[in-house]
Amino acid sequence: MVDVFEQVEGELRSDRYKRLFRTWGPIVAGLLLLALIAALAWWGWQSFQTGKADKASAAYDRGMEALRAENPAGARTAFEEAAREGNGAYKSLALQQQAGLAVTANNIPEAIRLFDGAAKASRDPILSDPAALKAAFLAMDTAPLAEVETRLEPLTGDDRPLRAFAQEALAMARLQNGQVAPARTAFVQLQLGQDVPEPVRQRAQAAIAMIDAGTAGSLPAIVRAAATAPAPQAQPQTAPGQGAPTQGAPAGAPVQATPQQ
């Protein structure tokens, strides 16, 4: 009799497992299939992105070689390819190089457009802020003060890498537009600031002296000199084993900065 009960119980257990499998088996199989598809899609996307980064790296290097060979047309073509193929970092750097070529060609509106594009291409302020600052410097002589302030004020935040340079540019823009007292106050703050780079501090001292001597009309020359200083040294993050570009010095760059890797 015990064997009969065990046999019946075993058959009931088997039927229960069969019903559970019929109910949940397709769902589990579907979830496993979705997981496999997602994994393959991620692998494919990563491979695609790595391939694009490799193309951007090669194009960027060709552009830098063309610049060293004084071949601006070849450099422009290579940087256009790097901007088209690359991720945010490569795109930002390539657009800045194109903007430098536009400055050399005295095409300032195009240079401003390219610097603006470079600033938007990367969410890393190490790359985006120099581009935004260059655009502001180039726009300073022609754009209304309100537009220049809109460009510069976001760059003056405490956590921004080029805060002092942006504060200096903002003070110069206000001085150019007749706001002498606010400009002088800003220059004094830069002169006394603890973390202000020495070149900015020296220019602030010179600006204060010019304002006090009544010769502040010479300051536009300082603005133009700052706008053509060397470019920041920057390297985008790349995949392991992938070459990173070497940042050159496009014209129109106001400052130097070294990114955090």
Image (cartoon, helix red, strand yellow):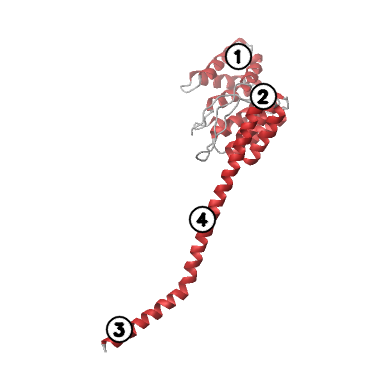
Label 4 packing within 10 angstroms: few (<14), some (14-19), many (20+): few
Q: Nearer the viewer, mark 2 or mark 1?
A: 2
Which mark is first along the chain, 1 or 2? Answer: 2
Label 1 packing within 10 angstroms: few (<14), some (14-19), many (20+): some
Which mark is first along the chain, 2 or 4? Answer: 4
Which mark is first along the chain, 3 or 1? Answer: 3
Q: Amino acid at mark 3?
A: Glu
The image position of residue 50, as x and y in percent, is 56, 44
| CA gap, disc 3 and disc 4 | 45 Å
Element type at mark 4: helix
**Which is more toward the observer, 113 or 25?**
25
- Residue sitting at the far left: 2
Residue 69 disc label: 2
Q: Is residue 34 above or below residue 66?
A: below
Task: Name the residue beneath numbered marker 1.
Answer: 211
The image position of residue 90, as x and y in percent, is 59, 36
Q: Amino acid at mark 1?
A: Ile
Task: Name the residue beneath numbered marker 3.
Answer: 6
The image position of residue 98, as x and y in percent, is 67, 31
Task: Name the residue beneath numbered marker 4.
Answer: 39
Q: Residue at x 26, y 86 (%)?
A: 2
| CA gap, disc 1 and disc 4 | 64 Å
Q: Residue at x 55, y 54 (%)?
A: 41
**Which is more toward the observer, 101 or 243?**
243
Q: Nearer the viewer, mark 1 or mark 4?
A: 4
